[in-house]
Image: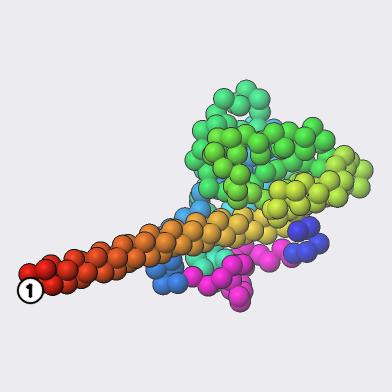
Amino acid sequence: MSAADSEDDGCLSPPQSPGPGGPPLSPSARALNSQSHIYKIVILGEGGVGKSALTMQFVSHSFLDFHDPTIEDAYQKQARIDGEPALLDILDTAGQVEFTAMRDQYMRGGEGFVLCYSITDRHSYDEIIEYKKQIQRVQHREDVPVVLVGNKYDLQEHMRQVAADEGKALAQQWDCPFYETSAALRHFVDDVFHALVREIRKRRRAEVLALERRNKKKNRGKRIKAMLTGVFKKSADSESESSSK
Ligand SMILES: Nc1nc2c(ncn2[C@@H]2O[C@H](COP(=O)(O)OP(=O)(O)OP(=O)(O)O)[C@@H](O)[C@H]2O)c(=O)[nH]1
Ligand SMILES: [Mg+2]
């Protein structure tokens, strides 16, 4: 998805019908799935790409016009996304190399990730590929919910170093949403966080369905075993009856 495919719809997106992709959940799956309306989100990327500026715009509609390198900041934001409540628990991380030792820890704790580069900084784009690999390594899985973000869109005319197509291509390869954002202009900021919640919900749904399938298989196995036990018992009973006659 590119920036052109979505609109900045304010802080709370209106309920949409139908909800996020995937088949409707059965009551038991819904019960499991609704256990948490909390979404643990981690924002990652090189120093200075605008992680804090994006987070501040999302949380408090204000723009940070100076660079105060982050060590670690946590925010919470309540929203209604596709008609369902969500509490976004956002960890704004350090991009500076001095703090790289903490990355594994951030990556272990997150359920979904905003991977942010600056369209004015090619190195930050190259680095984001490494961040993605590291997340997969730390989480021991391939299908981690992510949204790819190329920030500082407002500077594109004179300072662009990464083409929009490069972002799109990477997102296509990762099968994840992509936005070119401007924290300065509050351009597609809500869309990024809302899209990530949708990605997390998609994965939770898939996990619940997989669990249900496994349980069904197990129950079917138990039923067959019980039936066979019954059949054997019956034939053993009738055999012993006929031999006693
Ligand atoms: N023009 C423009 N400037 C931006 C944008 N986003 C952030 N900036 C500026 O870029 C600088 C760095 O932004 P931060 O949000 O502090 O960057 P960061 O990724 O949090 O950096 P670290 O905390 O060091 O990892 C600041 O001067 C911001 O004002 C944007 O969309 N457009
Ligand atoms: Mg920061």
Hey, which quadrant is residue 190 in on the image?
bottom right
Horizontal side of residue 45 vs 163, given as left or right: left
Give the residue drawn at x 74%, y 65%: 7
**Colouring method of the image:** rainbow
Q: Quadrant of residue 70?
A: top right
Q: Residue at x 82, y 35 (%)?
A: 122
Give left or right: position of 42 versus 163.
left
- Residue at the (57%, 25%) spot, across then down: 101
> Where does the magenta region start and end?
7-25
Ligand 1's image quarter is top right
Residue type highlighted by circle 1: Lys
Q: Residue furthest bottom?
A: 17
**Quarter location, residue 21:** bottom right
Quarter that holds the C terminus: bottom left
The structure residue drawn at horizontal position 42% and vertical position 61%, both measured from the top left corner, is 217
Residue 237, position as x, y percentages in the image: 15, 69
Q: Residues within 10 Å of mark 1 (few under 14, many from 20)?
A: few
Determine if the magenta segment contains residue 119.
Answer: no
Q: Is residue 184 above or below residue 19?
A: above
140 left or right, relative to 121: left
Between 97 and 226, the residue placed more toward the observer is 226
The residue labelled by disc 1 is 245
